[in-house]
Amino acid sequence: MKKLIAASLLGVSFCAHAQSSFVKDSLDSYIQRGLRNWNLPGLAVVVVKDGKTVVLKGYGVRDIETKEPVNADTRFMIASNTKLFTGTALAQLEFRKKLSLDDKVTQYFPDFRLYDSISTQLVSVRDMLCHRIGTKTFQGDFTFWNSSLSRAAIMQKMRLLKPGRPFRQDYGYCNSCFLTAGEVIPKVTGLSWEAYITDSILKPLGMTRTSALSAGMEKMDNVARPYTTSYSDQLHRVPYDQWDNLAPAASIVSTVNDLSHWLQFQLDSGRYRGKTIMPFAVLQKTRDVNIITSSRKSLQFPMHFRGYGLGVYSADYNGRQVYWHTGGAGGMVSNVCFVPEENLGIAILTNNDNQSFFEALRYQLLDAYLGVAYVDRSAQLLPGAQKEAKEQLQEISSWHSRVKGALPPLPVSSYTGTYRNPIYGPINISAGKKAGQLFIRFEGHADLTATLSWMDNDEWLLEYTNIEYGIFKVKFRTQGNKVSGIELRANEFVEYDAYDFVKQ
């Protein structure tokens, strides 16, 4: 007893030992409870500590119909966890003197333009990798996400994104920026982004069940199905995202088993199984903070400062430096995290995108290994999420109660036709199958449609056929008895801002 008291007073191993018992004795029950509380079908987790894989396991199911279980080799989309692979590849190419991260983008793409001429002249590869061109977070993604646009067409449309803040002053998360940076790789290597990532990272690390592209994912073996509880009180299967046109930002498919190799590489200074894959200087370059994302003390976690490197966030956590990134795809969210000072790495993959348990679990594991007094992070986050979901469902229910099959104030033909947004392009609105209903086809997306149902008070109920995009109330803009436009929005998971479409 005296030894334990002395240890606690000295601030040494007692706390760390007590917390490691959570991982050994309570992790399974904690995760199983989390799956139930958050309506999460399946989860896979890996923990690497001191050069060893100490947790490598799947929980729940990858398919709620077949009940096939998740295991360590189940494939998930890791979405924006792809970004560090892109940042690492470009840092490696700089180390090899194939390019400089401070090279101007126009050096590789002379016709590339941002919204204003000064930003166009100044913007560098580094700017593209750290989200500091002045655009808002997710700006343009409704146009780009799951669209039929090519990579070149997305880059062309970036000139239409009007920045909300000054160039290089503020952080605004930008997927099309990472696409642009990744497309520099073919310019200097002659290899596509996906070929270079495969040859320089995936193969050397033995990530044999990892694919740089996600096309055809539904046909892969042992693959998780994507689900959401957004805008509903039950799980809905949603389509696999078609990310390959934004590949350097989001397209990698992987497993926790393979990600254990990536974590070992990060924690062993660029080595894997004793072999140097990349110099440590390359990894350091990706971790150097290029823009501050927050400098305010967290109210929930032992964190104060957060910044962004080249595809990875950096923060303090109970006195240690932590690196991490989250990934959000339709029906799947993930986190990859590593703490070099503690030789600790964590990866968590899940198949319901409308839950925060994947983050609660990461913080719980950080707490366990970094000596933070126990707080049930899932229980801490759950009430707020449940309250928000309840309020959303009540609002949607009230909207549905206003849809009674009545006719709108103007003839249906007044609303039909082609509408255009300068960034997105055209949509087509036609008469729906029911009275008081219209049908929208989004021309930039092969499979995206929606219905508009007349409610009352000049308001319509917008429901996307892919529930991932959301349910909203909207209004047509009219001048006299003539319809002139409509403002549409999507789930903030896609893009925060609404799009104004003008009737042609």
Image (cartoon, rainbow, N blue to C red):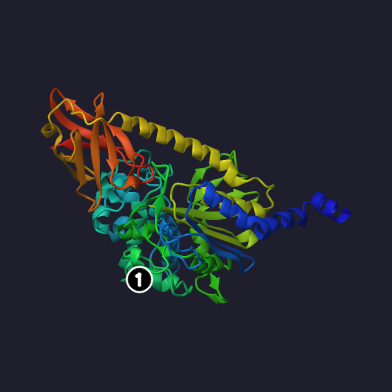
* For residue 490, above or below residue 339: above
Pick the front one: 375 or 308: 375
Q: Position of residue 123 (x, y in %)?
A: 35, 51
Q: Is residue 110 visible?
A: no
Pick the front one: 113 or 356: 356
Q: Amino acid at mark 1?
A: Ala
Q: Report the residue marked by disc 1.
A: 195
Name which residue lies at 20% across and 28% down.
406
Q: Is residue 285 visible?
A: yes
Q: Position of residue 7 (x, y in %)?
A: 82, 54
The tally of labels here is: 1
Name which residue lies at 31% across and 50% down.
121
* For residue 423, above or below residue 267: above
Pick the front one: 202 or 368: 368
Q: Quadrant of residue 409?
A: top left
* For residue 358, above or below residue 440: below
Q: Dot 1 surroundings within 10 Å: few (below 14), some, or many (20 or more)?
A: some
**On-image quarter of the C terminus:** top left
Left or right placement of residue 418 versus residue 261 in this view: left
- Seen as rendered, the residue at the extreme right is 2
Name which residue lies at 61% across and 49% down.
317
Q: Secondary structure at mark 1?
A: helix
Left or right placement of residue 502 versus residue 241 in this view: left
Q: Position of residue 188 (x, y in %)?
A: 33, 68
**On-image quarter of the N terminus:** bottom right
Q: Quadrant of residue 343?
A: bottom right
* For residue 161, above or below residue 480: below
Pick the front one: 451 or 372: 451
